[in-house]
Amino acid sequence: MEVSKPPPATPQRYEPKYAEGALDVLLIGLGSIGTVYAYLLERSGKVRVTAVARSNYPLYAGDGVTIDSQRFGVITNFKPYRVFKSQAEALADGTKYALCVVATKCLPDITPNAKLLEDSIKSGQVGAFVLIQNGLRVEEDLYAAAPSIPIVSCIGWIAINTNTSGDVVTWKGVEKTGTGLFPVATADKPHSAQQQAALDLWVNLLQAGEGNVVLTDNIDSMRFGKNVWTATWAGMQGLIRTPAACFEPLNEAHHAQIKKYMREIQTLGWKTGLLYEGMVLQPMGLKAESIDQLIDFDFSRVSEAGRTTAVAHKWSLLLDVENNRPFEVEVIFGSMVRLARLHGIETPLIDFVYTLLSGLQASIVKSRNAPAVEESKPVKDFP
């Protein structure tokens, strides 16, 4: 839901108001995405967020940040209830966290989720995990490491960026959070009461802070729907180092080459049942009718963006490359390659893009002296 009244015209200093009996929630990652979800949760009054921040810890431990939001106005001096440098510190006092929200990128080739969350898993102090991450099968290694702890899987559609110093988060428009349980329920293995309670709690808390939730019974399918768009445009931006609006003035022969790549991704989704006729694709609410319809819609919407906006949108993958940071090559691109192999589907263009981006990732990792872990293996139970 959108706020029913316009945001305040003047900046408002953040003044948290915690209700009696407010729940404790642990949040990992205070980047721009983590900041927005920390704010929405605390805005509910029902949650005290304890956040783990690394490079920007001094910022949040000090005066906090400014959130410049079209929905809620300008909020100054925002910082969660507590901020620590590590999970170990956040867990040291024995606090029981109803949820652990993960708002970092999923990088299984650098730090798998199970490794990232090792302290929380071992502590027994976390009721459920909420993963707000792009890509496919981001949940699998965490599920293997902690099968008894519910996993609420989320993808966010949100226009957001942070300034160079990190102290101003600009949030445009209305966000949507696609939400479902992992693994997807089957007739033989329905979701447990514990899993359903975790999902209900997350949704209720987010909506209480006026967050917009889109529920799904098949998070794998919803994830693929977003990945179609991400793999196309984020991938190309990362390779050519420029926003995708540069393709709009080119001729139809050039456009056809991009659409071939888009078609291969779409075809993989339709052949594996992750995309299907009548499926509602978020965030625009478009009902899928055919591959051609989706290709034409996606291509026009992104390639023509330069005409309708003052500044063409940079995907986070491009920003990562520009700042020499590892990006989500495995869960966005490698996951599609492994899915295709599992089903015996040829995907030469996806394979090629994955290879190029893997080389780019390797160069970034080498320059940062960050050891990469062994590439994740195909998942036998991929739907």
Image (cartoon, grey):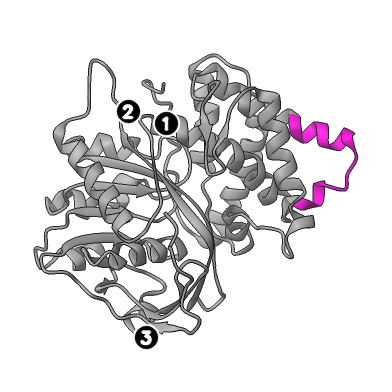
Q: Is residue 348 visible?
A: no
Residue 296 at x, y percent in the picture: 73, 33
Residue picked out by circle 1: 220
Q: Left or right: where does residue 378 sit relative to residue 299?
A: left
Which is nearer the eye, 352 or 290? 290
Gap in Å between the C-alphas at discs 2 and 1?
A: 7 Å
Q: Is residue 13 above or below residue 109?
A: below
Kindly identify the amino acid type of the residue bearing the numbered disc 2.
Answer: Val
Q: Name the residue at 24% across, 62% down.
A: 87
CA distance for labels 1 and 3: 39 Å
Residue in view at x 19 percent, y 72 percent: 18
Image position of 299 (left or right of 128): right
Indicate left or right for 114 with 154 as reference. left
Viewport quadrant of the N terminus:
bottom left
| Mark toward the start of the polypeptide (3 vs 2) | 3
> What residue lies at 23% left-to-right and 44% top-to-bottom?
200
Residue 63 is labelled as 3
Q: Earlier in the sequence, mark 1 or mark 3?
A: 3
Q: Position of residue 17 (x, y in %)?
A: 23, 75
Q: Is label 3 in a helix, a strand or a loop?
A: loop
> What is the magenta range?
245-259
Q: Which residue is mark 2?
A: 184
User: Is residue 324 visible in this depiction of the protein?
Assistant: yes
In the displayed structure, would residue 316 be above or below residue 248? below
Q: Amino acid at mark 1?
A: Asp
Q: Are marks 2 and 1 in contact (CB under 8 Å)?
A: yes
- Of residue 358 and residue 156, the one placed in the foreground of this image is 156
Q: Is residue 288 magenta?
A: no
